[in-house]
Image (spheres, rainbow, N blue to C red):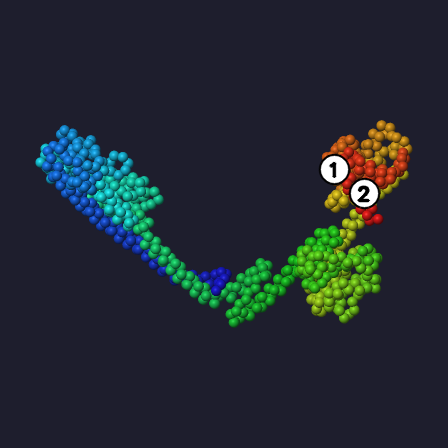
Amino acid sequence: MVFPRTFLKSRLARRVYMLFILCALVPMTILAVISYVQVNRVIMDNELRGLQRNAFSQSMAVFDRMVFLDKELEMIASHLARYPGPGKAPVLDSGGGPLSIHFLGLGVFDHDTGGYIMVAGAEQPQPLIMRQPLHSLPSDTSMVLTDHQGEGPGSVFLIRRIPGRSISSYVIAQIDLEYLFGLYAEEAEEESIRLSILDEGKILFTNLPEDHGESLLKAVPSGDSPSRGFSWTAGSGTYLSSSAPVFLKSKFAGTMWKLVLSEPKEIIHAPGVMFRNIYVPVFFTALLFVLLLSMRQIRKSLIPLERLKESTGMISRGELISHEVIRSGDEFEELSESFNVMAIKLNQQFNTLKAMAGIDRAILSLLDTDKIVETFFSRIGIVLPNDAAGVYIRDSAGSSAWYLYTRGASSRGDTHPNIMIIPLSIPGEDLEPLNRYMEYIVLRKDDGMPAYLDRLSSQDMAMYLILPIRVKESLYAFIVLADRHAKEHSHDYIIHARQIADRMAVAFANASLIDEMNQLNWGTLTALARVVDAKSSWTAGHSERVADLAVEIGRIMGLPEKDLVTLNKAGLLHDIGKVRTPRPILNKPGKLTEEEFDIIRKHPEDSSRILEPITPYRDIIPAVLQHHERFDGKGYPRGLSGESISLCGRILAVADSFDAMVSDRPYRKGKSLDAVLREIREEAGKQFDPLVVDALMQVFKDKEERT
């Protein structure tokens, strides 16, 4: 079951909901905290008492083993007493004599003379023994000595007087610590408890990690009495420890040991963690049950009202898509149905207005007839649903030639429709109803269809809405929206259709104005070119021919439309600087003098200076200025070469030279086409760009194939 969150925005719902939550959450939380704290406390107390008991029992076990080892040493001393003097002592081993396997080494030492005889095992450290007050050692008591040389564990020695010999004769045994402590350490380690034996502030034996010793020594309480417990930290771990003394002084002379048992707290707290891991899911399961139960009850009582309230707010914010469906079997359900109908109608209105605004912006921003029509087809289905649509545009004023723009069969509803353009002729009588300046016309299949609807009626349409479009008070175009099913269009549908037609009328008027301005512009350029060419009867039509040929070459070379327009303009105006050239020089039948040729060579720069103040023509200045440059750098006025000459300049150079060579001049007759093409081919790479020459050859090859 899905519960919406919006119901909590109701103050009453929040109060009831919080009451449910608090009744469950507060007692369960208090119980959880008390239980967790109590469980941890009991675990810690039990573990501490266990460590104390274990430490005491282990210390007694160590003491018992020391007593046992003392008995063994006493028997060894009795055995040695049968041999007079240190030099007479036999060499013992674990197989042939009383030497215990619990000793690592055994020796006889005379304290007065300093003599030492190794009986078995490792030799004992004499300086350590020499420093001990052995004369005061009773004959029935052993002395315990420890040696802490080096960084490893210490060594433990047991010393006893040999009976029957002089007072300075002693037997010395080194105790095997693995026997003395190892068994207890292994048993403790199996239970995750670490055993340490301390001797007067130094570690005698431990199975803790090597780097934990210093931390333990700093934390262990001073004194010989058992400790209740203490905590200490080493590395990333924390330990709980308990210590107990090993009462060696009750039986032995020498040092006092302290036994310490340590257990990681993470192991001690493991039962508490387990309790927490079990209790937390139980707690949240119970809480979830309370949440679901409370939400169910609140939803059943308050959610319908809250949802309607929220939906009203969404409508006020303009969010009209969401619909509320309430199945409560009461007045809330009826209210929600009425509310949804209202929201649907509002959404349709807003979508229509939004789409209309988008169409207005898109259409009115365009100045090209084809793009205006394409935009119409990509947007019309959003505002005005239809099964077929067409836009009829007159070819020219007063003409019966029209063009039908319609969508391809595979582009219905496509934002980039496939537009088909179909030429057709519409007689004046078919256009008479539209010429009456009617807002719209509705035609049905049975009314008799005019011939211009044949293309659309072939798609089995039953009803047509026709909207005339006027530009400058004359019929310029009309829109046809067709449907397969006869139906009455709503008032809003017709109003929106008329609005779109009016917007298209404005767009077509703008496009028509731009076309007229372009025609005026090209007419002006052509007139200027003819004025320049008219200065000499030998150059009549030269600029227009150069412009046409340059555009053909550029098209063969794949230049974009923008560059083709530049070539056309540059071709028409490339010789405009000749208005400053004296007519006698232009019409001179003989060879020009050097001074006259210098004047002729100035006309590209004169053309550039004439065009420079005209901002729209600045893009053609490079081509005009460079049309007499040579590919090999021997041209004028700048002596440019290769690709440092603009591509339009290189194309214009070929077109200008070609027309000059095939045309008559006062000093020669025009050459034949084959001769000119052959000469231009020979100049490829020298006077002309080879790529442009190839394109020129392709132009005439294509013309020849067409003829």
Q: In this view, does 637 lie above or below 317?
A: above
The residue lying furthest to the left in this view is 164
- Front in this rendered view, residue 359 or 637: 637
Q: Residues within 10 Å of mark 1 (few under 14, many from 20)?
A: some
Tell me how many marks there are: 2
Residue positioned 81% across, 62% down in the render: 431
| Residue at the disc numbered 1 | 646
Q: Residue 549 carries which label?
A: 2
Under mark 2, the amino acid is Leu
* CA distance for labels 1 and 2: 17 Å
Under mark 1, the amino acid is Ser
The residue lying furthest to the top in this view is 594
Residue positioned 59% across, 61% down in the render: 320
Tell me, yes or no, whether the two marked residues, 1 and 2, touch with CB atoms within 8 Å.
no
Is residue 178 found left or right of 340 in the rendered image?
left
Under circle 1, the secondary element is loop
Q: Where is residue 612 drawn, in percent x and y?
A: 77, 37
Q: Where is residue 655 drawn, in percent x and y?
A: 81, 40
Q: Is residue 554 visible?
A: yes
Under circle 2, the secondary element is helix
